Image (cartoon, rainbow, N blue to C red):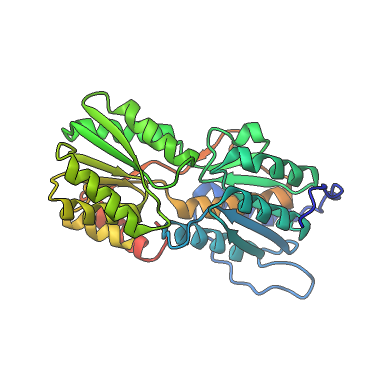
Amino acid sequence: MLSSTASPARPRRRMVTFSAVLSSVILVVAGCVGTDDAPDSDGGTGAAGTPELTVAMITHEVPGDTFWEVVRRGADEAARKNGVDLQYSSDPEAPNQANLVQEAIDGDVDGIALTLAKPDAMAPVVQRALDAGVPVVAFNSGFDNWQDIGVAQYFGQDEMLAGRAAGERLIRDGRTNVLCVIHEQRQVALESRCAGVREGFTRGGFETLDVNSKDMASVVATLTAKLRQDQSVDSVVTLGAPIAQAAVESRDAAGSTAEIVTFDTNAALIDLIRGGDVRWAVDQQPYVQGHEAVDALWLTLTNASTVGGGQAVLTGPAWVDRSNVDEVAEYVRDGTR
């Protein structure tokens, strides 16, 4: 059984040279990917010439969701650049995710990057990490909660803001009856997105539909039944690229004329945008979220630095539609958008 007793506070780590720190700061500010391929030395230092560090990244990933492949690509690149040993784990159930965080604390990791999809469940174990002297950064989920929980830095999208922007765009598109599909219940980021869409979509009908992304066949069946029953729905908003793909299938099966729009992208979705099956996507840039979460921990551990000045570092929203899909397509295929 995992212990809930906090470990003793850790001693302050030694700082690295100014040149190494300056190099990382430049990379963070410029938003560039590092290219330092120098091998680790035998003296316990990483590729960046700093002490070897272990960072745990713990998310609420649902198996099969392509979004997290992009997050991990960014995190892996930042870890490689900085000579960090990155340990990734995930569980969509909040108690299990909290247990993974506790295991990381017990494993004496140097830093933790995590998502706060279920912030109430994660708050106690985050506090245990902080009490043990382990710095914690949050990303992707928990925009409204990270500061209250005591996390120092956050990288992600303001979901309400992004949702409002999507709702306002639906008005410009001439939509009149919107269905917003929530694929994971009680997940704060998804609920905030739909709430934001509702705020921005100030005319016509609006409804939410709960589906279970752990069972994609049931997603298609539930959405097909809804669209078949209500032919007045003229826009379906999904909150993830795989759900958008399912929505296209459901729309066709139901004989609906509803347009599909979504949050987030993947390679298959790019083709759907090109072909007109999906009108547009809101991109929160998950590669940037994973990369900057790991990079920020490296800066904290090697230079006592923080990024954002106490404010969230926003990674979105950005739009992907037919006007710019060819510009981002190669990066989506490479797993960085």
Q: Position of residue 179 (x, y in %)?
A: 27, 38
Q: Is residue 170 visible?
A: yes
Please give left or right for residue 246 compared with residue 105 in the image.
left
Question: Which residue is at a point 64% across and 61% down the rendered structure image?
Answer: 82
In the displayed structure, would residue 298 be above or below residue 201?
below
In the displayed structure, would residue 267 be above or below residue 21?
below
Q: Tell me the quarter of the image containing the C terminus.
A: bottom left
Which of these two is toward me, 182 or 18? 182
Which of these two is toward me, 130 or 99? 99
- Location of residue 57 (image quadrant): bottom right
Q: Is residue 276 visible?
A: no
Q: Position of residue 34 (x, y in %)?
A: 54, 61
Q: Position of residue 314 (x, y in %)?
A: 48, 40
How many marks on residues?
0
Please give left or right for residue 220 compared with residue 5 in the image.
left
Please give left or right for residue 150 compared with residue 224 in the image.
right
Please give left or right for residue 74 compared with residue 331 in the image.
right
In the displayed structure, would residue 145 be above or below residue 20?
above
- Location of residue 252 (image quadrant): bottom left
Question: Which residue is at a point 59% across and 71% down the rendered structure image?
Answer: 37
- Location of residue 192 (image quadrant): top left
Question: Which residue is at a point 53% across and 44% down the rendered structure image?
Answer: 117
Which of these two is toward me, 185 or 84? 185
Question: Which residue is at a point 68% across and 57% down the rendered structure image?
Answer: 20
Q: Tell me the quarter of the image containing the N terminus.
A: bottom right
